[in-house]
Amino acid sequence: MAPRTLLAILGAVLAFNIAFALSFILRGAWPIAPFFGLDVALLAWAFHASTLAARRSERVTVTPSLLRIEQRPAKGAATLAEFNPYWVRVDLQWPTEFSNRLFLRSHGRELQLGAFLAPSVRESFANTLKSAISLAKSPRF
């Protein structure tokens, strides 16, 4: 969401919480009021954490001679990894029934991809990446 929208939602929640907190204070239940402030503070923190996590990304480029992965964390500098598509292996592991991990492996090097994706999306991406690498290896590419 846009920052203005998040601020508008936070402002609306704050207004409702102030109204309810005043209602409780006027009835003599003043110890309840700080919890209304805590509610708004936690919502603001959740919005901030979500906005920060949304910055995380990975860009995968496949050519006949190069498989390039640029990983951008939520904070910090991007990292770049390059593999030869002829030697790289796409390895999707299922440590439990409901979770998986995707790795690229080649010549003793290992790189985890899509850690922020849902398991079903990660599985679909692994299949798409395998197809793209196979296509890049083919003479028609």
Image (tube, helix red, strand yellow):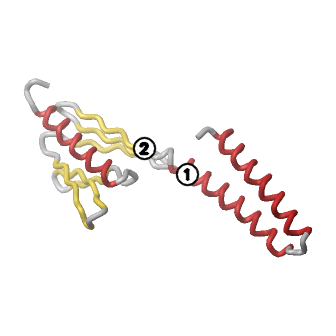
The image quarter containing residue 65 is: top left
Q: Position of residue 71 (x, y in %)?
A: 39, 45
Residue 124: horizontal and vertical position, in percent? 26, 45
In front: 77, or 18? Answer: 18
Q: Earlier in the sequence, mark 2 or mark 1?
A: 1
CA distance separating discs 2 and 1: 14 Å
| Residue at position x 18%, y 56% in the image | 108
* Mark number displayed over residue 57: 2
In this rendering, is residue 28 above or below 121?
Answer: below
Query: Dot 1 surroundings within 10 Å: few (below 14), some, or many (20 or more)?
Result: few
Mark 2 and 1 residues: CB-CB less than 8 Å, in contact?
no
Is 22 displayed left or right of 16 in the figure?
A: right
Query: Which sits in the foreground, 131 or 40?
Result: 40
Q: Amino acid at mark 2?
A: Ser
Q: In this picture, is 132 found above or below 37?
A: above
- For the point 12% across and 40% down, the residue is 86
- Residue that appears at 22% across and 55% down: 92
Amino acid, disc 1: Ser
Callout 1: SS: helix
Q: Establish if 6 lies above or below 115.
A: above
Q: Determine whether the residue tagged by mark 2 lies in a helix, strand or loop.
A: strand
Estimate the x, y position of residue 14 in percent, counting from the top left: 77, 54
Residue 18 occupies quadrant? bottom right
- Tag on residue 102? none
Q: Residues within 10 Å of mark 2 (few under 14, many from 20)?
A: some
Quick check: 25 left or right of 63?
A: right
Mark nearer the viewer, 2 or 1: 1
Picture residue at 60% right of the left edge, 56% below the top: 46
The correct choice, above or below, for 29 with respect to 133 in the image is below
Rendered-image quadrant of the N terminus: top right
Task: Report whether 26 appears left or right of 4.
Answer: right
Mark drawn on residue 50: 1
